[in-house]
Image (tube, rainbow, N blue to C red):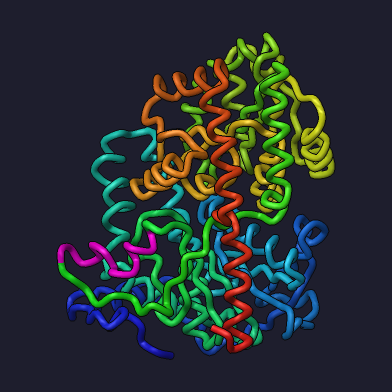
Amino acid sequence: MQDRSRSIFGNTVSPKDYEKALKSKAKYVRKYGDDANANYPAKLVDNACLFSPLGVRDIRVAEGTGDGAFDRDKGVIVGNIRMGFGHYRISIAMASAAHALGYTPYWMDLNSYPETTCTKVIGAQNDLYSLGSRLSQKFWLFNKLVWEPVNYEGFRKLSYNASDQKNAELMAAVFANVPKDIPLIGTHVWPAQAALHAGMKYVVNAIPDNWPMALHLAEGSVHTIQTHQSYMGYRILNGMRGKEVLRPMPADSLVYTGHYIDHELVANLEHDCEKRLERKKNGEPMRFLLTIGGAGAQRELFAAVIRHLLPAVREGRAALYVNVGDYRKVWDELVSEVDGLAALSTEHFDNWADTTRFAAEAVDGKVKGVHAFYHKNIFEAVYCTNLLMRSCDVLATKPSELAFYPVPKLFLKRIGGHEKWGAIHSAEMGDGTLECEDIPHTLQMLDLLLGEETLFAEMIRAILVNKAAGVYDGAYNVVKLAMQLKNGDK
């Protein structure tokens, strides 16, 4: 196993930072053990939610069920973790693109193998991240002094990557019986790093967000990014060791692809935009999609948005989709806090057939009132938003992975400083608002979108222009790149 913590793209890691990386790994070994010599079986099973629409099969590790018939010619692995919903959503986009291009997508969630050291290490860090996200929304001082700096500058440092690389050595064992010649697309850096440590031959590291951070580096893979601004920052490793001028990433290690978007959204984009303009022209209720992220934060902000829109819902000027993901408690709290919400709401709870039917019929049909969605299954919780996006008029979201989706967007306050660059990029591309950093500005933007045509129509126009320019083709391009690596056409 190559030691990837001593040097990062030719930039030597200081002895102090290397020692810190060693201590980080040793801490996890003491707590969770080291299963580097384990011979975990790898089995395949159909994904209960995503197999039917996208052909996705799960790679199960350390389990006795399933079969091992990997498609060595057409298979592509989407390596991910659940840390919030964002990495799952990007993974779905990759799987969707792979399926549309005629490949077989395999889903490998490194945070889903409870018997392994890999999952124990990731789970511990995921729990901390989720807690930090929620605390940052409740305590402004914690957000200002801890959460924003960690997400903005802490994850940016090369020293952070050195520790991550050393910790990722503990994740390699889950690849023991995964065919090494199947391309892997990592939608979080840890699967990409772990795959390289395990000897996987063709690894693409699909970087999220729009703020270059050393956190996302997996030397040995081909890195893909969604924006030109991000390309420039990663190419020179900008600011990753203060003001020091670092050795740049090699040209063949970094590729601009465009936004990572599901095939179904890209293929139907013109139709869906036409329907949005028709609804606006005909005075139909404007459909707002509110989606809670995987950390379960921002409930208070959602309550303010819903409370403000309810009069328009009663008058038939607005309709609401509220997806609380797998956080049923969030919906219960919203109902108790917002007077009149329950009476206007239809609940689509843990009934995937009902959810998919509603989403399909809403594309060309009529919608009124409030529709709430909750699903215990994580795939359904995430994919629900993707399905509802086609028929919504405005997506209200923090500027995370959803900042790149081809739908008019109202950006709520960020969770973590790195996210603000998603809103900046979207506003510059014309398909989203500026980030609304407080409730009054959020409500102002709601009123602008609801009460006039100009802003909304401009977003639709920008989406169509971006589509023609290939901005939303990133997922296709990542999958093609992964297969080109395997076929020797880098």
Say which of 181 and 57 sits in front.
Answer: 181
Is 158 drawn above or below residue 387 in the view shown? below
Residue 103 screen position, x and y as percent? 74, 73
Residue 78 screen position, x and y as percent? 62, 69
Residue 15 as seen in the image, left or right of residue 468: left
Whether the magenta-drawn stretch holds residue 256 is answered as: no
The image quarter containing residue 166 is bottom left
Whether the magenta-drawn stretch holds residue 231 is answered as: yes
Question: Number of numbered discs present?
Answer: 0
Residue 279 as seen in the image, left or right of residue 38: right
Q: Quadrant of the N terminus?
A: bottom left
Q: Quadrant of the C terminus?
A: bottom right
Q: Residue at x 71, y 48 (%)?
A: 380
Say which of 465 and 53 sits in front.
Answer: 465
Residue 276 as seen in the image, left or right of residue 449: right
Q: Residue at x 79, y 66 (%)?
A: 46
Residue 309 screen position, x and y as percent? 58, 17
Q: Residue at x 63, y 43 (%)?
A: 326
Residue 138 visible, this angle: yes
Q: Residue at x 40, y 30 (%)?
A: 436
The image quarter containing residue 413 is top left
Residue 477 as seen in the image, left or right of residue 123: right
Is 450 drawn above or below residue 242 in the view shown? above
Residue 334 screen position, x and y as percent? 58, 24
Say which of 144 and 488 sits in front.
Answer: 488
Residue 374 visible, this angle: no
Is 3 drawn above or below residue 88 in the view shown? below
Tell which residue pokes out farthest to the left in this image: 243
Is 111 drawn above or below residue 343 in the view shown? below
Magenta residue span? 230-243
